[in-house]
Amino acid sequence: GGMGASGEQLIEGVIIAVDKEVIPYGTTVVINGREYIAHDCGGAIKNNRIDVYFDNHQDALEFGVQHAEVYMKVGEIDG
């Protein structure tokens, strides 16, 4: 992988592209029980769309378009 828009390394199955107005860079999100980190954006990634990073296009095509609930993780509360 290369570098995401946030300057972080792109890692397959870990990094997602987001609309940073909806999900800020560095946010951990949970999709279908799996954690991803928002560190990239893209021209078609607007509003509630998310793009999971894959090292090659064929893997991305096989993953396809999916609809899922997305949860943003928040910091733990002390006390």
Image (tube, grey):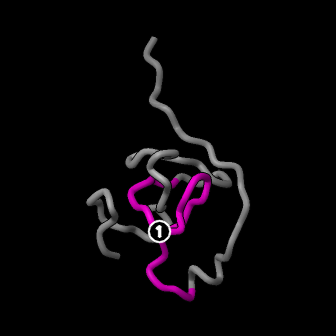
Q: Is residue 27 above or below residue 5?
A: above
Q: Which quadrant is home to the N terminus? A: bottom left
Q: Residue furthest top?
A: 79
Q: Residue at x 68, y 72 (%)?
A: 65
Name the image quarter holding residue 60. bottom right
Instruction: Mark 1: give few (<14), some (14-19) or many (20+) Cα within 10 Å.
Output: few
The reply to whether the magenta stretch includes residue 38 is yes
The reply to whether the magenta stretch includes residue 20 is no
Query: Mark 1 sits on what residue?
Result: 43
Q: Is residue 2 above or below residue 69?
A: below
> Total marks drawn?
1
Q: Residue at x 33, y 62 (%)?
A: 5
Q: Residue furthest right?
A: 67
Judged left or right of residue 40, residue 34 is right
Q: Look at the numbered disc 1 and give the secondary structure of its residue.
A: loop
Q: Can you give x and y, in whole percent of width and height, for residue 48 in the image?
A: 61, 53
Q: Residue furthest left?
A: 7
Q: Is residue 42 above or below residue 61?
A: above
Q: Can you give x and y, in whole percent of width and height, for residue 33 in the image?
A: 65, 51
In this orientation, which residue lies closer to the viewer: 55 or 22? 22
Question: Which residue type carries mark 1?
Answer: Gly
Region rendered in magenta: 36-58
Q: Can you give x and y, in whole percent of width and height, for residue 19 in the image?
A: 49, 54
In this orientation, which residue lies closer to the viewer: 19 or 64? 19
Q: Can you give x and y, in whole percent of width and height, for residue 46 in the image?
A: 55, 58
Q: Residue at x 68, y 54 (%)?
A: 32
Q: Is residue 56 above or below residue 17?
A: below
Main SS, magenta region, reads loop
